[in-house]
Amino acid sequence: MAGTNDRRHVFVLLAPAMLVVGLTTLYPLGFSFWTSFHDWRLIKSLVPGAFIGWENYEVAFTDDPVFWTVVRVTIRFVVIDVVATILAALGLALLLMRAGFARTVLRTIIILPFAVSPALIGISWRFMFNPEYGAIHHTISTFLPFMARIDWFASPALATYALVSADLWHWAPYFAFMLMGGLASVPAETQEAARIDGASDVRVFFAITLPQMAPVITVAVILKTVFALKVFDSIVTMTGGGPGLETSTLAFFAYNTGFRDYDMGYAAAIAYVLTIILFALSFFYMRFIMPRGR
């Protein structure tokens, strides 16, 4: 009886949290999945229309060239964003691992970007890339005069790099601290042994330190891929998905389809394509960090 009462108490204590999760997460997921199998256009009806099965998914994969353009844009953005962020974070981690008072000060300063809202970052960086009065544009054009007249957000390539730079500024500090933990876990004995054998610092890093950091870097890459796929706020406030579709990712495309074109059924299908990708990455992440015996 005591065990039964304990289980009841646990259930009673967990019930409020389970209710909140159900209402805010499970119900929206279930309703959007159900919506993806219906023809629902808000300009015609405020409630879902006829059940059409997998038609929305078939249109996306076989009859909508815009969808595949957005997929290409998403892959390009994610690859550039993940590589740039992890490399920048690794560089920051190596600098911050050095001893001294400046390390403590820098650690405090570089974490500040992570506390800023992505929407605010997008607005701020859009101003800073402005060709007339932007600080970043002015700095770049000082060293590269031929870029003085370039409009960053009118160029497909430059708009992508501007968006990546804003996201890198936001996330690099977070991953720098993660990689610092990885650097701290590398046994100093292996590095000292390599130096005694005559290896340079560069060779020690690439032959000894980096391979032992592979698990931490793998986790960082998976997490940053998930975060890059979910980028939305900065796209809305910085590029608006343009020029054309050159910075329109799947998340932004789903939003536009639902709330600009009012095709809620098709938008839900696109969103679920992205959800499946994110779920697969999250599943792989959990399997990677959890011991195999569990």
Image (tube, rainbow, N blue to C red):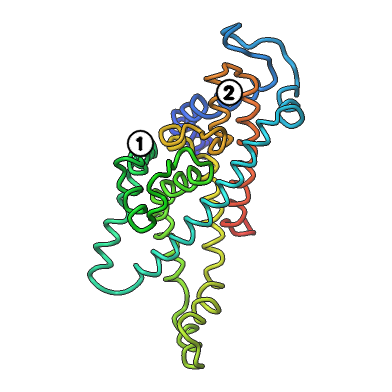
Q: Quadrant of the C terminus?
A: bottom right
Q: Residue at x 56, y 28 (%)?
A: 26
Q: Which residue is mark 2?
A: 257
For label 1, the SS is helix
Give how far apart the Cα atoms at labels 2 and 1 are.
23 Å
Image vertical order of residue 189 relative to residue 126, above or below? below
Query: Which residue type does callout 1 highlight?
Result: Ile
Choose the circle earlier in sequence order: 2 or 1: 1
Image vertical order of residue 176 relative to residue 46, above or below? below
Marking on residue 68: none
Q: Residue at x 35, y 40 (%)?
A: 130
Q: Position of residue 179 (x, y in %)?
A: 45, 63
Q: Which residue is mark 1?
A: 123
Q: Position of residue 134 (x, y in %)?
A: 31, 43
Residue 65, picture quadrant: top right
Image vertical order of residue 164 relative to residue 34, above or below? below
Furthest residue in direction bottom, as rendered:
197
Categorize mark 2 by other alpha carbons within 10 Å: few (<14), some (14-19), many (20+).
Answer: some
For label 2, the SS is helix
The answer to whether the residues at label 2 and label 1 have Cβ atoms under 8 Å apart is: no
Q: Nearer the viewer, residue 281 or 154?
A: 154
Residue 253, picture quadrant: top right
Query: Which residue type does callout 2 highlight?
Result: Thr
Image vertical order of residue 130 relative to residue 176, above or below? above
Q: Position of residue 113 (x, y in %)?
A: 33, 49
Q: Nearer the viewer, residue 289 or 110?
A: 110
Categorize mark 1 by other alpha carbons within 10 Å: few (<14), some (14-19), many (20+).
Answer: some
Q: Position of residue 205 (x, y in %)?
A: 49, 77
Q: Nearer the viewer, residue 160 or 170?
A: 160
Q: Nearer the viewer, residue 10 or 134?
A: 134
